């Protein structure tokens, strides 16, 4: 995983400690513990946590894209969101599906060929 600078880029001057914790601890130390949990699993957990809390925003899209890069397929994410819809809310699932459909649009296009 490449060194994260999103916190410093967005909040470095306004909230430097938060930015440092975001970049160095969350993405630097926690996400790098691949010997404990794979990046794929961490992505799935993160996307699930964001979806169930209703955080369907640009950070959610970033984590969907990361999940895709880490090997989660469109079929898998659709199954996860279908399962979660019953536990965390139908509207949250709809919102998540809309964004996921954009991220995995290339897979959908391949299926039509």
Image: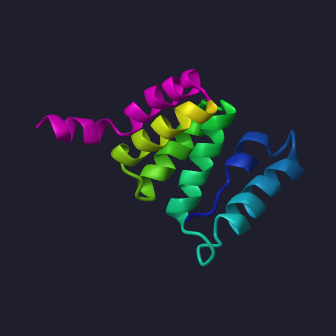
- In the rendered view, would you say 28 is above or below 5? below
Outermost residue, top side: 91
State whether the magenta stretch is mostly helix, strand or loop. helix
Say left or right for 106 vs 51: left
Residue visible at 55% across and 65% down in the picture? 1
- Which quarter of the rendered picture does the C terminus lie within? top left
State the image coordinates of residue 22 (x, y, percent, origin top left): 76, 53
State the image coordinates of residue 12 (x, y, percent, origin top left): 80, 46
The foreground one among 39 and 7 is 39
State the image coordinates of residue 63 (x, y, percent, origin top left): 55, 45
Say left or right for 17 vs 76: right
Residue visible at 75% across and 49% down in the picture? 8
Say left or right for 39 vs 13: left
State the image coordinates of residue 51 (x, y, percent, origin top left): 60, 36
Outermost residue, bottom side: 35
Q: How is the image coloured?
A: rainbow
The foreground one among 48 and 27 is 48
- In the rendered view, would you say 3 is above or below 92? below
The stretch in magenta equals: 89-113
Q: How many marks?
A: 0
């Amino acid at each position: 995983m490449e060194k994260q600078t999103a916190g410093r880029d967005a909040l470095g001057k306004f909230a430097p400690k938060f930015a440092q914790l975001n970049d160095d601890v969350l993405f630097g130390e926690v996400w790098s513990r691949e010997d404990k949990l794979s990046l794929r699993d961490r992505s799935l957990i993160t996307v699930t946590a964001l979806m169930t809390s209703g955080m369907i925003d640009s950070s959610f899209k970033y984590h969907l894209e990361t999940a895709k890069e880490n090997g989660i397929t469109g079929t898998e994410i659709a199954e996860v969101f279908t399962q979660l819809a019953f536990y965390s809310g139908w509207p949250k699932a709809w919102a998540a599906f809309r964004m996921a459909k954009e991220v995995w649009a290339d897979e959908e296009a391949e299926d039509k060929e």
